[in-house]
Image: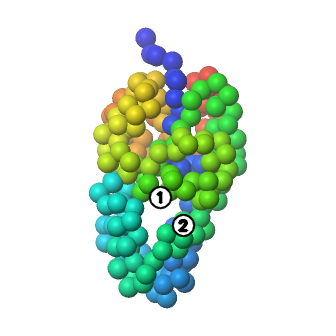
């Protein structure tokens, strides 16, 4: 018999908020006086962002290393302001999450360094208002999506069985990783479809 769902776990970027990577790049480029290609290379092509997401570099070292790659004394505020500029709350998805929260536990699991979770009230206030402290960055679990280890560590930390967790993400590989870890998972394609899926599982 399938156990009831006790936790609904949401992805952040492109689920609860629209994420514009180009806006983040443009913001940092303006601060450091470099072109977009140099910023993109420093954050992603260097592998730094992936290592930070997986918890392989501390938050302080992440900021310092990014500054070194850009040859600029980058500050935490610089990083936060750029990240915030790239995030637009999806009010419809957030409203669905709030409706789910009336009867079920909810949380966020995002591929990010811990800075994002620690500063979610500044970065995306509407998400913070609904989820409170229940926003978790992959880095805090020492793995990143789509690794099944991430999901297992997250639900264990939350004290919920994998089979009782319903996970929502916009990336198919991340959904597959969650399913491999034993979670029930759904690929987000839009609010209307998500609403129907949540209703089907009696989560609304």
Can you name the residue that lies furthest to the bottom here?
Answer: 33
SS for callout 2: helix
The residue drawn where x is 62% and y is 48% is 128
Viewer-closest of 78 and 169: 78
The residue drawn where x is 67% and y is 37% is 98
Q: Position of residue 108 (x, y in %)?
A: 52, 43
The residue to which callout 1 is attached is 115
Q: Position of residue 185 (x, y in %)?
A: 46, 34
- Left/right placement of residue 83 relative to residue 101 reads left
- Left/right placement of residue 60 relative to residue 122 reads left
Q: Position of residue 68 (x, y in %)?
A: 35, 80
The residue drawn where x is 42% and y is 57% is 113
Indicate the quadrant where residue 193 lies: top right
Proximity of marks 1 and 2: CB atoms separated by less than 8 Å: yes
- Left/right placement of residue 78 relative to residue 121 reads left
The residue drawn where x is 45% and y is 16% is 2
Q: Position of residue 8 (x, y in %)?
A: 53, 32
Q: Residues within 10 Å of mark 2 (few under 14, many from 20)?
A: some
Residue 37 is at least partly visible in this image: no
SS for callout 1: helix
Looking at the figure, which quarter contains the N terminus? top left
**Image position of 161 with respect to 22: above or below:** above
Q: CA distance from mark 1 to mark 2?
A: 8 Å
The residue to which callout 2 is attached is 80
Task: Please state the total of marks drawn on the protein image.
Answer: 2
């Amino acid at each position: 018999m399938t156990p009831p769902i006790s936790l609904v776990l949401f992805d952040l970027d492109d689920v609860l908020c629209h994420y514009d990577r180009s806006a983040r790049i443009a913001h940092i480029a303006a601060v450091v006086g470099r072109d977009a290609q140099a910023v993109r290379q420093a954050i992603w092509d260097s592998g730094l962002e992936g290592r930070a997401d997986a918890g392989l570099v501390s938050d302080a070292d992440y900021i310092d290393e990014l500054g070194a790659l850009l040859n600029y004394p980058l500050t935490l505020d610089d990083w936060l302001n750029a990240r915030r500029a790239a995030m637009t709350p999806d009010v419809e998805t957030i409203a669905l999450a709030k409706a789910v929260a009336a009867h079920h536990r909810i949380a966020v699991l995002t591929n990010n360094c811990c800075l994002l979770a620690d500063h979610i009230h500044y970065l995306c206030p509407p998400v913070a208002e609904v989820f409170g402290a229940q926003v978790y960055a992959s880095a805090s679990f020492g793995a990143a999506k789509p690794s099944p280890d991430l999901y297992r560590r997250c639900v264990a930390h939350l004290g919920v069985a994998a089979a009782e967790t319903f996970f929502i993400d916009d990336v198919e590989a991340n959904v597959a990783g969650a399913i491999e870890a034993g979670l029930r998972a759904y690929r987000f394609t839009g609010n209307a479809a998500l609403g129907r899926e949540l209703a089907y599982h009696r989560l609304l």
